[in-house]
Amino acid sequence: MAEAKSKFESVREWVVEHKLRTVGSLWLSGIAGSIAYNWSQPNMKTSVRIIHARLHAQALTLAALAGAAVVEYYDHKTGAKADRYAAYIPHKDFK
């Protein structure tokens, strides 16, 4: 009997299947959070607030891309990626 997947394993599988969506979501949440934080800071020009928000979101995006690269490397090393796509490749028996 197969065990139920843990919440972490389910999230990890979703991230593996949707890497770009994950990075985009992190960027969007990073820029929104940074704008919200910067707007609470007094004595700052609007242009500076927007520039800071962009820089924070860019750093978060780079970290997310690095994380996606680590996940891709791990999948490649363990062979999980090859197993996942093997079903889509037609195999012919040469006898």
Image (spheres, rainbow, N blue to C red):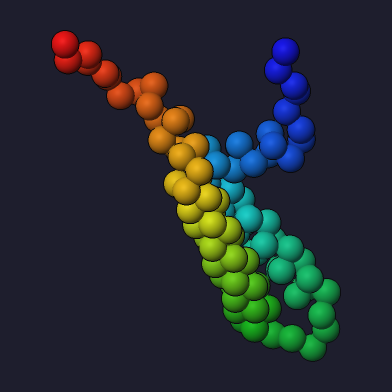
Counting labels gives 0
What residue is rendered at 58% in x and 48% in y?
A: 22
In this orientation, does residue 56 appear? yes
Give me the residue at 53% from left, 50% from top. 74
Left or right? Give the position of 41 relative to 32: right
Instruction: Check the image and report above or below for 46 versus 33.
Output: below
Residue 4 vs 56, above or below: the answer is above
Left/right of residue 34 with respect to residue 85 in the rendered view = right
Compared to residue 94, the image places residue 44 above or below, namely below
Q: Nearer the viewer, residue 95 or 83?
A: 95
Instruction: Name which quarter of the figure residue 86 lies in.
Output: top left
What's the residue at 49%, 37% (across, down)?
80
Rendering coords of residue 79 (x, y %): 46, 40
Image location of residue 83, percent across then percent down? 44, 30
Query: Quadrant where the C terminus lies?
Result: top left
Camera-side residue of 31 and 2: 2
Q: Please tell me which residue lies in front, 69 or 32.
A: 69
Instruction: Give the residue furthest to the left.
Output: 95
* Image quadrant assignment for residue 67: bottom right
* Residue 20 at least partly seen: no
Quadrant the N terminus occupies: top right
Residue under the image location 78 percent in, 71 percent down: 37
Judged left or right of residue 37, residue 57 is: left
